[in-house]
Amino acid sequence: MGHLTARWWNSLHARLLIGTLLGIVASVLIAGWVLSEVFTQTMSEQLAREVRVHLNELAAGLNIDASGVATFENEPADPRMQRPFSGLYWQIDQIHADGSVETGVFQSRSLWDEVLNFSQAQPQKGQQGLWLLSGPKAQTLVVQTQVVTPAQGEGTWRLIVATDHESLRKPQQRFERLLIISLGLIGLVTVIAVWVQLSIALKPLRRLRQSLQAAQTGSARRIEGMFPAEIQPLTDDFNAVLETGEQIIQSARTQAGNLAHALKTPLTVMTNASRNDQSELGRLVFEQTDIARRQIDHHLARARAIAAARMPGVATEVVPEINKLVHTLDRLYASKALQWHVDAQKQDLLFQGDRQDFLEMMGNVLDNACQWTDRDVWIEVTQVGSETMSQLQIVVQDNGPGLTAAQCEMMFERGVRLDERAPGSGLGLAIVRDLAHAYAGQAGAQRSEYGGLKVVLILPGIVALK
């Protein structure tokens, strides 16, 4: 699970999605901050206009006669100014010529017996002309003032209108809640839309990856299907490389086969001619031609294996080929009445290599087991490693006499024969190890738990794609 998570985080899909999400989050935060500031500014301006109206009403209702006596008529009509501690207040202070202030000369009924002490007011941050003041019932008030200098009389008059700060803060809080919900929904819808868009946009890349894996494992010889214009040239070039590589390998195999045929024909003639010659020269020729023939077979098989191992798109079904070999060997050793025990972990395992190489390796190992077993042969095929980069482990055991540890190592050496193999049995156990090494695999032997020999092959493999 952790490996899959790490792979996803390192994928192009994850990087694009994370980058887009960061952009969306940044955009939502900036948009939220801008809208909140705009709303606050708008509400403050609206409140200032409302307060200005009340100040104008106060200025219109204040009358000062020739003797300097002030009277107040026509209070503002807002009913909140008549209700005690309603949160909307007005007050008129007189500022004398000597600088002293007589507070609350006139005031709204809503103040009841309280007085606004404007000397304690603090400017509201970011709002020119608005002040914050502590009012009745521990209310925080937003205050705006206007100074009136009458044409007659002395001093000046300060008109004050105050409103509860909650009248500004509560709408702002409601707006911010709605803003958060709205932007959250917009962000969620945007994320879903981006996810869908990325999934659709990256789907051709996933198909390309599956096609490449199919070509690598042998499930397909080419990258099939149509892809977007940005990807199609890549697939065409890759198919051209596959085709060129296949042609080169096929040409090399043909030339190697022609060379082998050209060499084997005179070697066969020399071998047959010297077979019945018991002279020293005849025996020497027979021995050396036999060695030359086996060397040719050995190096041709190794060259073919190396070419197949480096060629993508080459794969062989494991279990069906083993079953065919079992059927053939069962008929070849019918006199032994062999008992086969085939245990395959999965039926769709593939060997990433040439079919002929696989048959030569398995044919020699199974043939050796058939010759020396008392009756039973056990074959176990398992997959080791991950699902995408795996190896095949093929274990062949018999219940024959077995070999010592030194003999188990010697049996894979070139030219060493610890058993008398029947004609046509293949290249021998030496080529089994060479072919396995050519495919970056392993071949080893040890004493079997059934008493005979246990041969273990480790080969590149993968589960067939569905």
Image (tube, rainbow, N blue to C red):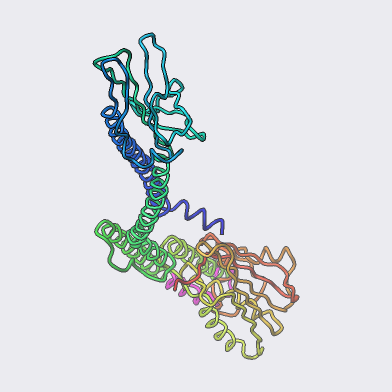
Quarter of the image holding residue 82? top left
Q: From the viewer's perspective, tell me whether residue 303 is left or right of residue 396.
A: left
Residue 273 locus on image (x, y percent): 49, 76
Is residue 204 in view?
A: yes
Q: From what the image shows, is residue 300 above or below residue 277? A: above
Q: Which residues are magenta?
A: 264-282
User: Of residues 205 and 442, which is closer to you in this image?
Assistant: 205
Q: From the viewer's perspective, tell me whether residue 211 is left or right of residue 342.
A: left
Q: Quadrant of the C terminus?
A: bottom left
Q: From the viewer's perspective, tell me whether residue 324 is left or right of residue 205.
A: right
Q: From what the image shows, is residue 424 above or below residue 164? A: below
The residue that appears at 47% across and 64% down in the rendered structure is 305
Furthest residue in direction top, as rendered: 98
Residue 80 locus on image (x, y percent): 38, 41
Q: Quadrant of the N terminus?
A: bottom right
Q: From what the image shows, is residue 149 above or below residue 426? A: above
User: Of residues 395 and 87, which is closer to you in this image?
Assistant: 87
Residue 436 locus on image (x, y percent): 55, 64
| Residue 69 falls within the magenta-colored stretch | no
Which SS does the magenta portion mostly show?
helix
Residue 314 locus on image (x, y percent): 42, 68
Is residue 19 in view?
A: no
Q: From what the image shows, is residue 63 above or below residue 49? A: above
The residue that appears at 39% across and 69% down in the rendered structure is 257
